[in-house]
Amino acid sequence: MKNSLDWLVSSGNLLDKPVAILSASTSKMGADKANELLSGLVKVLMGKVDKTTNLKISSVNKKFDENSELIDQVLKNQLKNLLSALEAEGNK
């Protein structure tokens, strides 16, 4: 990930582009610190991220069944909404 971010810093490829950020954790925090840091970095790189394209997933281990199928309907809807928001931003 660091190499990707290093490349993005020098390329300018995120300039005014919509970016989705997802963080997940088995804790109730949803990797909120990592999410916050990455969101800040994307903004420094001039990428477009807002609350509609940013998702923190807490207790992610409880949202999938034993076959790794997503079973949490709320999360399914959140992911659909995030992708719709990202697509809408990309079409502006």
Image (cartoon, rainbow, N blue to C red):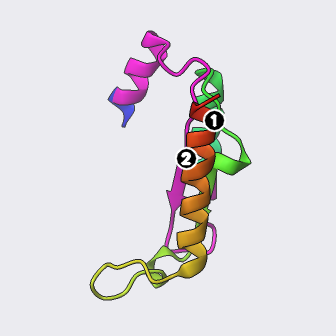
Magenta range is: 4-32
Residues at discs 2 and 1 in contact (Cβ within 8 Å):
no
Report x, y in % for residue 45: 58, 21
Q: Is residue 9 magenta?
A: yes
Residue extending farthest right: 51
User: Dot 2 corresponds to which residue?
Assistant: 21
User: At label 2, which amino acid type do we have?
Assistant: Ile
Q: Secondary structure at mark 2?
A: strand
Between the C-alphas of marks 2 and 1, the distance is: 14 Å
Query: From the viewer's perspective, is residue 82 above or below residue 45?
Result: below
Name which quarter of the figure residue 17 lies in. top right
Q: Secondary structure at mark 1?
A: helix
User: Dot 1 corresponds to which residue?
Assistant: 89
* Label 2 crowd bin: few (<14), some (14–19), many (20+), radius 10 Å: some
For marks 2 and 1, the one nearer the N-term is: 2
- In the picture, the quarter occupied by the C terminus is top right
Report x, y in % for residue 5: 43, 27
* Label 1 crowd bin: few (<14), some (14–19), many (20+), radius 10 Å: some
Name which quarter of the figure residue 90 lies in. top right
> Is residue 58 among the parts visible in the rendering?
no
Residue 8 - label: none
- In the picture, the quarter occupied by the N terminus is top left
Residue extending farthest bottom: 66
The answer to which of 69 and 28 lies nearer the viewer is: 69
Q: Is residue 79 magenta?
A: no
The answer to which of 38 and 12 lies nearer the viewer is: 12
Q: Which residue is at 36% across, 87% downward?
A: 65
Q: Which residue is at 58% across, 51% downward?
A: 84
Q: Which residue is at 44% across, 79% downward?
A: 61
User: At label 1, which amino acid type do we have?
Assistant: Glu
